[in-house]
Image (spheres, rainbow, N blue to C red):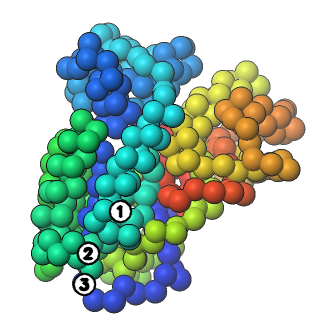
Amino acid sequence: MTAPVPDDDDDDGEAQGLRKIIHVDMDAFFASVEQRDDPSLRGKPVAVGGSSGRGVVAAASYEARAFGVKSAMPSSRAARLCPDLVFRKSRFDVYREVSQQIRAIFREFTPLVEPLSLDEAYLDVTEDVKGIGSATRIAQLIRAQIARETRLTASAGVSYNKFLAKLASDQNKPDGLCVIRPGEGATFVAALPVRRFHGVGPRGAEKMAALGIETGADLAAKDLPFLRAHFGSFADYLYRAARGIDLRQVRPDRQRKSVGGERTFSQDISTGADLREALDNIVDIVWERIERAEARGRTVTLKLKLNDFTIRTRARSLPRAISGKAEFARTGHALLDEVLPLPRPIRLLGLTLSALERGESEPPREAKDGQLRLL
């Protein structure tokens, strides 16, 4: 795990005093919209995404999650886990429309709204523009209004910084509310498994476990030199997070640099056919993230890590934004064709869209450039 803190800004400066931050996260958003619009799906396991052999799950209902189905999972595996799984194709125009409804609700309570994607956002309600008197009450009112106007449920976390608010919103899902008050952050974090820390993926958690770090308390027991020796630039984030510290401000004008994803394979691959199939899977997942983040960009970058850990990249920039998933896939495959045949098998493959032209939000990420691990 070498990625720096997700969604971190070294140049943001320190937030002045304690803030009142709400993180709102829609519950199984895409799948819930499908269940809302088609009553026959209610109570059934639903996956949004492609059902073909190489398709991937973009979102799963809570009924499907009970079987182990989750986003970025190959559809074939999801169908094996849940034989009664119902697949629905993504309808991003509908999801965007609902997302705009939800953002309009947020802005009734504060102008300081930082969307992370179509289905989640940070709100700074320190300045109580409606005179409600309580951040917790504001979160309750927002959730009630979302339910009333969209017939969907949202979970919310309330705390004094972004890191804690995001942890809290995931604590009582679905349709839940969790509040972490001033002075409670370090205690709350101490009891959590480190896998709950945003930015710590499965492999990062494995590395930490090998070092005797499994909970926030274990992490807090390690000093900064130890963390820097083992985790490099990620160490400072881990040190602060273990103590419930986060100085980032809610930024309504936040601009992302890129959206992408990469996959490390359990077995090295080398043949052109295997690489092309793997790239198709990555395209499916990354394009869903691009749609979710409402991103438009001109540059596609292919990343390959060979089994000797050397890294090769190829990039291509268009004179205008990528027009759609098909062009994104064609560009990625053209870049792959440029490097074939490879001198050695590869252990990692990634694809990124950058030179972004617009977008008011950032997707949650595990790396500074917007990369997310696919596994």
Give the left or right position of residue 12, taking residue 129 as reference. right
Give the left or right position of residue 201, taking residue 37 as reference. right
Comparing 319 with 8, the one in front is 319
- The residue shown at (16%, 57%) is 141
Q: Earlier in the sequence, mark 1 or mark 2?
A: 1
Total numbered labels placed on residues in the image: 3
Q: Quadrant of residue 33?
A: top left
Q: Is residue 275 above or below residue 287?
A: above
Q: Is residue 17 above or below residue 149?
A: below
- Spot occupied by residue 150 in the image (x, y as percentages of width and height): 28, 39
Comparing 81 with 292, the one in front is 292
Q: Residues within 10 Å of mark 1 (few under 14, many from 20)?
A: few
- Spot occupied by residue 288 in the image (x, y as percentages of width and height): 54, 37
In terms of secondary structure, where does tag 2 sit?
loop
Q: Which mark is residue 129?
A: 2
Q: Amino acid at mark 1?
A: Arg
